Image (cartoon, grey):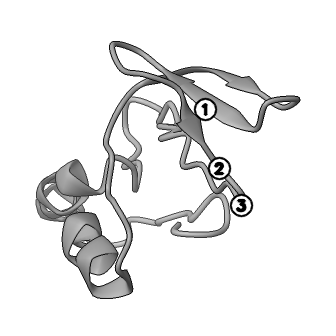
Amino acid sequence: MHIDLPKLARFAGVRFIQADVIGIDLAMRQVLCDGRPPLRYDVLSLNNGAVPDAPEDGVAVKPIGRFLPRWYEAERDLTAGSRIAVVGTGAG
C-alpha cells in the first residue's frame, strides 16, 4: 500500500519533512538530519526503510514500487505444478 505522506501531513496539520536521519539526540529530544538543522520532537516515529534481500528466484515486497512488476514477471515464469512459498510477515 502506498500512502501519500505529504497529503496525510497536510490533512493532520503537521509538517512533512523527508530527510536522511544521521542521528538522534535523546537528551535534547532532537532528530539530526543530513543538511538541515536538528528537529525537536515530542513523540517520534521512524520508518527505517528496510529493504530485505530476496533470493534470486524470490520476490521481495519492499520496495513496494518494484513489487508488482517483479511479481507479474515471476507469475509468467510459473509452470503447471509450480509451488510458491511465502516467507515473512507484515507486508509479506
Mark 2 to mark 3 CA distance (whole Å): 6 Å
**Taking the image as drawn, is residue 15 in sight?**
yes
SS class of the residue under badge 3? loop
Between 79 and 70, the one lying in front of the other is: 70
Mark 2 nearby-residue class (10 Å; few <14, some 14–19, many ≥20): few
**Taking the image as drawn, is residue 1 in sight?**
no
For the residue marked with disc 2, what is the amino acid? Tyr
Tag 2 residue: 41
The answer to the question of whether label 1 and label 3 lie on touching residues, with beta carbons closer than 8 A, is no
- Of the two numbered discs 1 and 3 on the same chain, state the one appearing first in sequence: 1
Q: Residue furthest bottom?
A: 11
- Displayed quadrant of residue 22: top right
For the residue marked with disc 3, what is the amino acid? Val
The answer to the question of whether label 2 and label 1 lie on touching residues, with beta carbons closer than 8 A, is yes
Residue 43, which numbered label?
A: 3
* Residue at x 11% of width, y 56% of height: 69
Quadrant occupied by the N terminus: bottom left
* Residue at x 67% of width, y 33% of height: 30
Tag 1 residue: 31
- Of the two numbered discs 2 and 1 on the same chain, state the one appearing first in sequence: 1
Mark 1 nearby-residue class (10 Å; few <14, some 14–19, many ≥20): some
Q: Position of residue 92 (x, y in %)?
A: 53, 66
The answer to the question of whether label 2 and label 3 lie on touching residues, with beta carbons closer than 8 A, is yes
Q: Is residue 48 above or below residue 91?
A: above
SS class of the residue under badge 1? strand
- Displayed quadrant of residue 65: bottom left
Mark 2 to mark 1 CA distance (whole Å): 7 Å
